[in-house]
Image: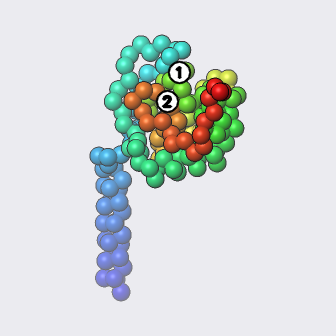
Amino acid sequence: MRRDAFLYGFVSIMLLSVQTVFAQTPNPGAAPGAQQLLQTPIGGTRIPRETPVGNLRNPYEGNSAAIAQGRQLFKSMNCNGCHAPQGAGGMGPALSDAEWIYGSEPAQIFLTVVQGRPNGMPSFARALPEDDIWKLVAYVRTLSEIPGRKPPPASQPQETGKP
């Protein structure tokens, strides 16, 4: 009986120590951490950027499944209430053009979602896990018509207003 209790205690301690080691081991393909993101300069077309944005990658950029989840988050978190369903803008700025107030790089968009912005953009740091924010960032970047990016697929023919 005493031997079983000792063995049980020993195995429990070993499992806890293995779990601690794995929790502290960084994932090489993981999203950028908070410290890296906080060093990202904010700025775009209206707010000049003093230093270039570092090369922080969104782990979901180009991932169609993650982009679809980002689209769902855009709807469920009511982003379309301010930015319009296709990011055309409304109460919030447009996300479908080349003019981005706080920058259009993935890290800049991530920080905008996490921190919020003056005059209406709330912080979603407590509402969404970082993983979901990266998926949302991947979707938002598909809305933009910035050269070098693919425009979103047209679901309906667009009227030009020309005869």
Image quadrant of residue 158? Answer: top right
Give me the residue at 70% from left, 28% from top. 91
Question: Which amino acid type is marked by label 2?
Answer: Glu
Q: Nearer the viewer, residue 159 or 8?
A: 159
Residue 138 location in percent, x, y?
Answer: 47, 41
- Colour setting: rainbow
Look at the numbered disc 1 and give the secondary structure of its residue. Answer: loop
Return the mark for residue 145: 2
Horizontal and vertical percent position of residue 61: 41, 42
| Left or right relative to 80: residue 1 | left
Task: Looking at the image, tell me whether mark 1 or mark 2 is earlier in sequence order.
Answer: 1
Badges 1 and 2: C-beta atoms under 8 Å apart? no
Residue with the mark numbered 1? 99
Front residue of 35/11: it is: 35
In the figure, 144 relative to 128: above or below?
above
Q: Would residue 16 appear left or right of 125 to someone viewing this image?
A: left
Which residue: 63% across, 46% down? 75
